[in-house]
Image (cartoon, rainbow, N blue to C red):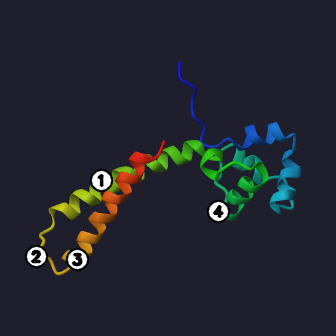
Amino acid sequence: MHDRILTNYLRTYRRRSGLSQRELGLLLGYNGRGQVPRHEQFATNPPLAIALAYEVIYRAPVSTLFLGMHDTLKTTIEKRLAAMEEDLQGRSAKDSDAASIARRLEWLMERRSLTRDDP
């Protein structure tokens, strides 16, 4: 049986640290402790500055702290990029923006080759 990937691992990292929700909230700049439980329980997503603050506090990349969200977004974006590439390839080279289309296709190919090289 496979372990379920959580939307985020904020609670896991907080418990490992020994911090209370209140203490973590204070480190994040919150006056009350209400926001931390909302983030941990997937009720709300933190603003970018707070997500980066979690990264600093736990010394773990945002993509690791929010693994489930990251995986979902990655899948969605990859599908959209494939659709974009298909659309661009279907356009006529005689279009007035042929150079722009060629540049975007080149970027997509470069991106794909970089992705293959990633572990």
Few, some or many C-alpha atoms within 10 Å of disc 3 (few <14, some 14-19, many ≥20)?
A: few
Residue highlighted by disc 1? 82
Mark 2: which secondary structure? Answer: loop
- Give the quarter of the image for residue 84: bottom left
- Marks 1,3: beta carbons within 8 A: no
As measured in the structure, the alpha-carbon distance from the residue carrying label 2 to the one carrying label 4 is 42 Å
Residue highlighted by disc 4? 48
State whether residue 56 is above or below residue 9.
Answer: below
| Foreground residue among 112 and 94 | 112
- Marks 4,1: beta carbons within 8 A: no
As measured in the structure, the alpha-carbon distance from the residue carrying label 4 to the one carrying label 3 is 35 Å
- Three-letter amino acid code of the residue under disc 3: Ala
Few, some or many C-alpha atoms within 10 Å of disc 1 (few <14, some 14-19, many ≥20)?
A: few
Residue highlighted by disc 2? 94
Numbered circle sitting on residue 99: 3
Among the two numbered marks 1 and 2 on one chain, the one whose residue lies closer to the N terminus: 1
- Three-letter amino acid code of the residue under disc 1: Ala
As measured in the structure, the alpha-carbon distance from the residue carrying label 1 to the one carrying label 2 is 22 Å
Mark 1: which secondary structure? Answer: helix
Mark 3: which secondary structure? Answer: helix
**Residue 69 on image: x %, y %:** 55, 47
- Three-letter amino acid code of the residue under disc 2: Lys
Among the two numbered marks 1 and 3 on one chain, the one whose residue lies closer to the N terminus: 1
User: Which label sits in the foreground, 2 or 4?
Assistant: 2
- Marks 3,2: beta carbons within 8 A: no
Among the two numbered marks 2 and 4 on one chain, the one whose residue lies closer to the N terminus: 4
As measured in the structure, the alpha-carbon distance from the residue carrying label 1 to the one carrying label 3 is 20 Å
